Image (spheres, grey):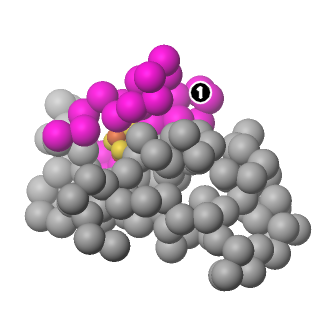
Amino acid sequence: MVDSLIDCDEGRRLGCRTFCCRLLVRLAEDEREPAMNGSVPKGFVDKGPDGLCVHLDRCTHRCGIWEKRPRVCREYDCNHDYLLQAAVRVGVTNIVQLAKDAQALRIAIENCIKVPGCAGDVD
Ligand code: SF4
């Protein structure tokens, strides 16, 4: 299984405010919990009323299931998401506002801020 090479601690220091944990987290078929009442298993991770993943610890801003987090969270690379560039500059209130901010900022590729890789990453 591919694991993220992004240093999420450094991303938080840069100000990403864990915007990735506001995105829709789809679950692969083998990751879905069997439904109790015989209905179709849920294909995504729930969000809290604040729009953040239910597994995100609101105090530490760390994933509460890091070792067992869904595949899409492991494979997601925020550095290829233009929303990260807006998030580290203007913060995140909600994903719709963030998309508007990103469009208005028009950040050139050469001005992108990169979240470094994890320790040991040769990048
Ligand atoms: S499962 Fe963990 S990494 Fe994935 S969105 Fe939720 S808190 Fe973030």
Residue, disc 1? 49
Task: Work out whether residue 37 or residue 122 is closer to the camera in this orientation and state it.
Answer: 122
Task: Work out whether residue 77 or residue 50 is closer to the camera in this orientation and state it.
Answer: 77
Q: What residue is drawn where x is 43% and y is 60%?
A: 116
The quadrant of the picture occupied by the N terminus is: bottom left
Left of 85 or right of it: where is 69? left
Name the outermost residue toward the bottom.
109
Left of 62 or right of it: where is 40? left
Residue 13, image x, y percentages = 54, 40
State whether residue 30 is above or below residue 111: above
Q: What residue is drawn where x is 87% and y is 68%?
A: 104
Residue 34, image x, y percentages = 15, 41
Quadrant of the picture in which ligand 1 is shown: top left
Residue 11 in view: yes
Residue 72 in view: no
Q: Mark 1: which amino acid?
A: Pro
State whether residue 114 is above or below residue 61: below
Instruction: Specify whether tag 1 is near ligand 1 (CB below 8 Å).
Output: no
The quadrant of the picture occupied by the C terminus is: bottom left
Task: Work out whether residue 82 or residue 55 is closer to the camera in this orientation and state it.
Answer: 82
- Stretch in magenta: 38-67
Which quarter of the figure has residue 118?
bottom left
Q: What residue is drawn where x is 26% and y is 71%?
A: 122
Q: What residue is drawn where x is 26% and y is 53%?
A: 119
Left of 92 or right of it: where is 80? left
